[in-house]
Amino acid sequence: MTTIQHISTGRRVKDRMVQGLVYLAFALAVVPLVSVLWLVISNGLARFDMEFLTHSMRNIGARDAGGGAYHAIIGTLEQVLLASVISVPIGLLTAIYLVEYGNGGRLSRAISFFVDVMTGIPSVVAGLFVLAFWILFLGMPYSGFAGAMALSILMMPTVVRSAEEMLRLVPADLREASYALGVPKWRTIVKVVLPTALTGIITGVMLAVARVAGETAPLLLTVFFTDSINNDPFNGPQMGLPLFVFDQAARPNDTAIDRAWTGALTLILIVMLFNLVARLIAWWRSPARGR
Amino acid sequence: MATKVEVREGGPATGRPAPRRTSSEGLFRWLSTGSGIVLLGIMAAIAVFLVSEAVPALRANKSNFFTELTWDPNGGQVFGIAALAFGTVLSSAIALVIATPVAVGVALFISHYAPRRLAAPLGYLIDLLAAVPSVIYGLWGVAFLVPLLKTPSEWLNSTFGWFPLFAGEGAIGGKTMLAGGIVLAIMILPIIAAISREVFLQAPKMNEEAALALGATRWEMIRMAVLPFGRPGVISAAMLGLGRAMGETIAVALIFPATFGISFQILTPQGNSIAANIANGFGEAGDIGRGALIASGLVLFVITLLVNMAARMIINRRKEFMKAGT
């Protein structure tokens, strides 16, 4: 007749208190998220109309209502696309080096370490680097491409890390089967390893895109401002959506603040869309892997 | 180098014919190695070009860059990093003090308290905090947080005004270090929570179950089996968060009123940081002004690099230790 001894009240109270604190911490973290989303949606909807999505700020006076972010949306999409074009090949090849060729040597450990460190480079420093190198040293003009270069520096480490993780998931059996058939290593990588890891790599790239699409500081230093539509990312100042929000938010009148909120809403929608597509690709692929 | 690889790949175990070392194989290998080297090169180039563009402005500086408080490179050619660096450190410290306990709580919630089925979606919810662009946090901070903090700030000041951080006369509340620090805390919370969550989940299940079997409550189990194991991970996560907070630009550029002074009063409207000063000062900067901003960016780069490298070394040592342990 042994009975389980009861836990003393003091210990039980302490356990409950910690549980309460942990729940409270989670609630505390969710409150700002809900608050931010709520404010952006409720304040942003007022100006979320066709004019906003199809017009630029050209010839809109300081106090005028109206105007839109078309030029900024175009700019952001082009800059993000260019940034991906630069960073995805470099990032992917670096990941291939780390997984397939590096063999844990000194170079691969150095690259791996600095990829981690690169993740922590402040975005404003990436912008300053492009400013110093491209615009001041080489004498190139402010342009969307300069902004894309700054963004690509921020994207690269994310792409390398996610691609590396996906390549490591590819079973060694597949590689060995391919080698056994006499296929050279590089063709094995291109035809067997990459296709197997492809969806995962795309997911990683989309998440990296979502991360840099909201960056303001690097654009501020490299793309500069414009109120007009500039479709050419290689020539002249462009606009970006985050930059548009920053610019409008710093203006003192209500019509500009309204535009800032609507710009914020558009930006969140774009970022969430990238996130969602990435998750969808990941989800669509997971049953095939038999998880 | 090439022969070494041939020996390994063409060894008898694989039964392959003599390795077909085609030119495309070499090219591909060269391309991928080159990409890795390009990455290292970018890191080096960042340091080199920041230095080379900062030097002319530093030469033109008529005061000591490290001790001068004011920032007037365009007119008076007088500028210094002291006040800005102080603001960066103070606002990041506030952010860290607020974010770390909450993030550890969140991580414990996801790893040990939340129902299994809900843990993943709730974790995703926290990750979403990191997906919100920083300019939107800035907008939210100015429009929502700053007015919200007015009354609590006045109460803190009147009740605990003897405490240096809460001291101050005249205007209390508004665009303060506290407001900036809270926004930074929200922005670095997801990364601290995510890494802490990972290490808490890696805590040996055997120890946890052994603690529970000996009659420990959940909290006692966590204190004995999870927290000691996770401590280095949490420390490095906090350091990575610190690096983030120091480099964060646009949110604080919108919130801080861009004052130049050293003051510990976090409830009075004053504050600035290296990054915020770059964003706010770039528009009207001339040649020396831009060089001065680049010089301040170089300081920021070096500080964040050191913090990040230290954090990564702690994580990596932990990894090796764990590998050795298992």
Image: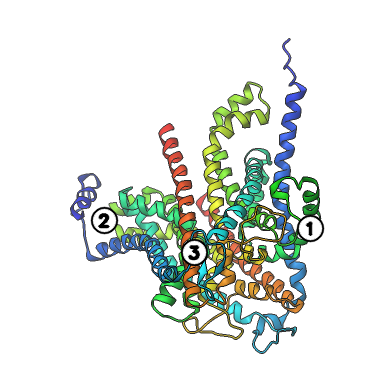
Quick check: A35 left or right of A268? Answer: right
Image quarter in which the N terminus of chain B is found: bottom left
> Distance from label 1 to label 2 (Cα)?
72 Å
Quick check: B37 left or right of B111? Answer: left
Q: Quadrant of residue A6?
A: top right
Label disc, if present, on residue B297 of the rendered structure: 3
Of badges 2 and 3, nearer the viewer stands 3
Is B76 situated above or below B142? below
Label 2 resides on the chain identified as A
Q: Tell me where residue A81 appears, x and y as whole percent.
A: 50, 73
Q: Which residue is mark 1?
A: B150
Check disc 3: other Cα within 10 Å, few if <14, some if 14-19, many if 20+: many
What's the residue type where badge 1 is placed?
Lys
Q: Quadrant of residue B104?
A: top right
Q: Tell me where residue A183 appears, x and y as whole percent.
A: 28, 58
Q: Are marks 2 and 3 in contact (CB under 8 Å)?
A: no
Q: Which residue is mark 2?
A: A182
Quick check: B125 left or right of A47? Answer: left
What's the residue type where badge 2 is placed?
Gly
Q: Tell me where residue A135 appears, x and y as whole percent.
A: 44, 77
Q: Are marks 3 and 1 in contact (CB under 8 Å)?
A: no
Residue A162 in view, yes or no = no
